[in-house]
C-alpha cells in the first residue's frame, strides 16, 4: 500500500500532466509532446491505483494492459486517416462502455454484500449507467454511419422526439426509484441499462452525416462526463479530473462547431439535417451549364498566380492526396506565388480533420487559416483551389432561404478571381443538395480522383 498522502500527490501530478497535455494538443508542433505528457500522466495514475488497491489478480490486470496497448498500437498504425473519425467514435463508445461496467460492478457488489449504498454514490452510479450506455450505443451507431455499415442519412419516424423524451423521463424515474428504495433493485438496474442502450441508438439515428463532426465532439464529452461520474462512484480523484477535462473540452468543442454552422445544439440533434436530397425545380445539374477544365489549363493558372487559396475537404482525405497538395504548393511558391489554406471548422468528418491531414504532409501551421481569418483574402486571390469540399463553400448558404444550410457561415470562395473545384463527380455533399458554386461563371470543374489530378498538376507546373 502507498501512503495516502503520496497517492494524492501522484494523482495531482497526473492531473497536471493531463492539463498540460491538453494545452499542448492545441498546436500541431506541440501535439506529439502533449500526447506524451498525457500518456505519462495516465501511466502514473494506473500504476498508483494498482499498487494502492486490493487487486484480486494483478496478472489479469497486466494481461489487460498488454492486450489494450497492443490494440491501441495496431489502431494507431493501421487505421487510415480517412477512417480516423470512425476510430474516434469507436473509442468514445469504449469509454462509455467502461463507465457502465465500473458503475454496474459497484452496484452489483453492494447487492452481493447486502450493503446499502450512500445516496450520493447511488446517484452517481445511476448517472454513470445512463450516460455511459447512451455514449456506448450512440457511438456504435455513429461508427456504423461513418463506416457506411448503415445509411448515413437521418432515420426518422413519427413522434420521434416525443418517444425519446418519454424514454429519458422513464429512465430518470427508475433511477430515482433506485435511489430512494432501500436495497438494490436488480430488475430496475437491468432495465435502466437496457433502455439507456436503446436511447443511445435513438439519439444518433436521426442525425445526418453533415452533423457527424458535432456528434463526435458531443459523444466525446459524454464519455468524459460518464468517466467523471465513475470517478465519484469509486472515489478516485484522478478519474474525476480526467473525466471533467474530457467532458468540458468536448462541450466547448461542440459549442464551437455549432457556432461554425450557425445552428443550435438542439437543431443539430433534432432537425435531421442531411435528409434533403431533392433539388428544387430548375436548380438541378441537368438544367445548367458546368464548365470543365483540363489539367494543363489548371496548371497554367496556378503556376502564374500571385495568391492561391487551397480549400481542403473530405474528398482530399479520401484520396489521401495531402502530400501532392504540399508538393504543388511548394512549386507555386518557387515560381513567386503565395499559397494559403482555408480551413472550415466542420470540413471533414471530425473536428480538426483537415488540420491533422495537412500536418501529416508537413504543411506549415502558419499557412492554415480559420474561416474568419481567410474570408477577407478571397477577393484578392487569383485562384481558389477547392479539393473535395462541398457544403462549406456552397453560396446557397447565403442566399437560398429554402436550403437546409441557409445561414451556415461558409468560405467565400466565390469571391476569388478564378475558382477550380476538384471532384470525382457532381454528386452533392452531406447536406444532400446541389452546390451552387459548381455553376458559378468563375468556376471550372476538374473532374477525377484528387490524387491523380494533383499529381498531373504537379507534373505540368514543373514543366512550365
Image (spheres, helix red, strand yellow):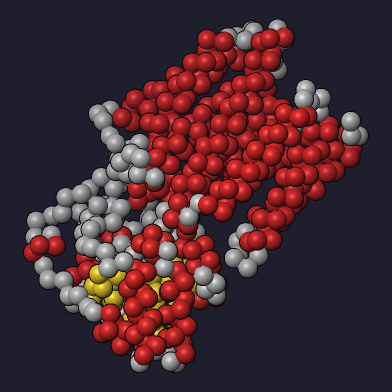
Relative to 80, 307 lies left or right: left
| Residue at the spot 28% in from the left edge and 52% down from the top edge | 431
| Residue at the spot 34% in from the left edge and 78% down from the top edge | 456
Q: Position of residue 341 (x, y in %)?
A: 44, 73
Q: Quick check: can you spot residue 137?
A: yes
Q: Position of residue 259 (x, y in %)?
A: 43, 55
Q: From this view, report whether residue 217 is shown above or below residue 424.
A: above
Quarter of the image where the C terminus is located:
bottom left
Viewer-nearest residue: 239 or 326:
326
| Residue at the spot 50% in from the left edge and 41% down from the top edge | 90
Q: From this view, report whether residue 208 is shown above or below residue 227.
A: below
Q: Quadrant of residue 311?
A: bottom left
Count how many numbered circles sit on residues in the image: 0
| Residue at the spot 68% in from the left edge and 26% down from the top edge | 233
Relative to 40, 140 lies left or right: left
Q: From this view, report whether residue 154 is shown above or below residue 300.
A: above
Q: Quick check: can you spot residue 412?
A: no
Viewer-nearest residue: 67 or 26:
67
Relative to 425, 318 lies left or right: right
Quarter of the image where the N terminus is located:
top right
Q: From this view, report whether residue 278 is shown above or below residue 395.
A: above
Q: Quadrant of residue 237?
A: top right
Q: Position of residue 325 (x, y in %)?
A: 43, 74
Viewer-nearest residue: 204 or 374:
204
Q: Position of residue 42 (x, y in %)?
A: 72, 45
Q: Quadrant of residue 112?
A: top right
Amino acid at each position: 500500500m502507498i501512503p495516502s498522502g503520496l497517492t494524492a500527490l501522484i494523482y495531482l501530478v497526473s492531473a497536471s500532466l493531463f492539463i498540460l497535455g491538453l494545452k499542448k494538443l492545441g498546436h500541431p508542433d506541440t501535439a506529439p509532446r502533449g500526447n506524451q505528457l498525457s500518456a505519462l500522466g495516465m501511466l502514473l495514475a494506473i500504476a498508483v491505483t494498482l499498487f494502492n488497491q486490493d487487486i484480486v489478480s494483478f496478472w489479469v490486470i497486466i494481461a489487460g494492459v498488454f492486450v489494450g496497448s497492443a490494440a491501441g498500437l495496431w489502431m494507431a498504425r493501421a487505421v487510415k486517416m480517412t477512417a480516423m473519425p470512425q476510430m474516434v467514435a469507436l473509442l468514445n463508445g469504449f469509454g462509455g462502455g467502461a463507465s457502465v461496467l465500473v458503475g454496474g460492478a459497484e452496484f452489483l457488489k453492494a447487492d452481493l454484500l447486502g450493503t446499502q449504498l450512500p445516496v450520493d454514490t447511488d446517484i452517481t452510479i445511476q448517472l454513470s449507467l445512463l450516460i455511459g450506455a447512451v455514449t456506448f450505443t450512440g457511438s456504435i451507431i455513429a461508427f456504423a454511419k461513418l463506416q457506411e455499415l448503415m445509411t448515413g442519412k437521418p432515420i426518422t419516424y413519427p413522434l420521434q422526439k416525443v418517444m425519446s423524451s418519454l424514454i429519458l423521463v422513464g429512465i430518470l424515474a427508475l433511477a430515482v426509484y433506485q435511489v430512494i428504495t432501500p436495497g438494490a433493485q436488480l430488475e430496475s438496474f437491468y432495465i435502466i441499462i437496457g433502455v439507456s442502450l436503446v436511447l443511445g441508438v435513438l439519439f444518433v439515428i436521426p442525425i445526418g452525416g453533415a452533423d457527424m463532426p458535432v456528434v463526435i465532439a458531443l459523444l466525446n464529452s459524454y464519455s468524459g462526463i460518464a468517466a467523471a461520474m465513475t470517478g465519484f462512484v469509486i472515489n478516485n480523484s484522478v478519474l474525476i479530473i480526467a473525466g471533467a477535462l474530457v467532458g468540458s473540452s468536448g462541450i466547448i468543442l461542440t459549442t464551437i462547431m455549432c457556432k461554425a454552422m450557425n445552428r443550435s445544439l438542439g437543431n443539430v440533434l433534432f432537425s435531421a439535417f442531411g435528409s434533403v436530397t431533392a433539388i428544387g425545380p430548375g436548380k438541378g445539374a441537368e438544367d445548367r451549364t458546368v464548365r470543365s477544365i483540363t489539367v494543363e489549363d489548371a496548371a497554367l493558372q496556378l503556376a502564374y498566380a500571385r495568391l492561391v487559396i487551397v480549400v481542403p475537404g473530405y474528398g482530399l482525405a479520401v484520396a489521401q492526396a495531402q502530400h501532392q497538395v504540399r508538393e504543388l504548393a511548394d512549386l507555386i511558391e518557387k515560381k513567386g506565388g503565395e499559397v494559403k489554406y482555408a480551413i472550415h471548422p466542420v470540413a471533414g468528418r471530425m473536428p480538426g480533420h483537415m488540420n491533422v491531414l495537412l500536418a501529416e504532409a508537413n504543411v506549415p501551421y502558419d499557412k492554415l487559416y480559420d474561416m474568419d481569418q481567410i474570408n477577407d483574402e478571397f477577393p484578392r486571390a487569383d485562384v481558389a483551389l477547392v479539393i473535395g469540399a462541398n457544403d462549406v463553400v456552397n453560396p446557397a448558404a447565403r442566399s437560398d432561404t429554402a436550403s437546409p444550410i441557409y445561414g451556415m457561415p461558409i468560405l467565400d470562395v466565390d469571391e476569388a478571381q478564378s475558382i477550380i473545384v476538384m471532384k470525382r463527380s457532381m454528386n452533392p455533399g452531406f447536406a444532400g443538395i446541389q452546390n451552387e458554386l459548381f455553376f458559378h461563371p468563375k468556376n471550372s470543374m476538374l473532374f477525377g480522383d484528387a490524387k491523380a489530378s494533383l499529381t498531373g498538376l504537379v507534373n505540368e507546373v514543373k514543366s512550365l
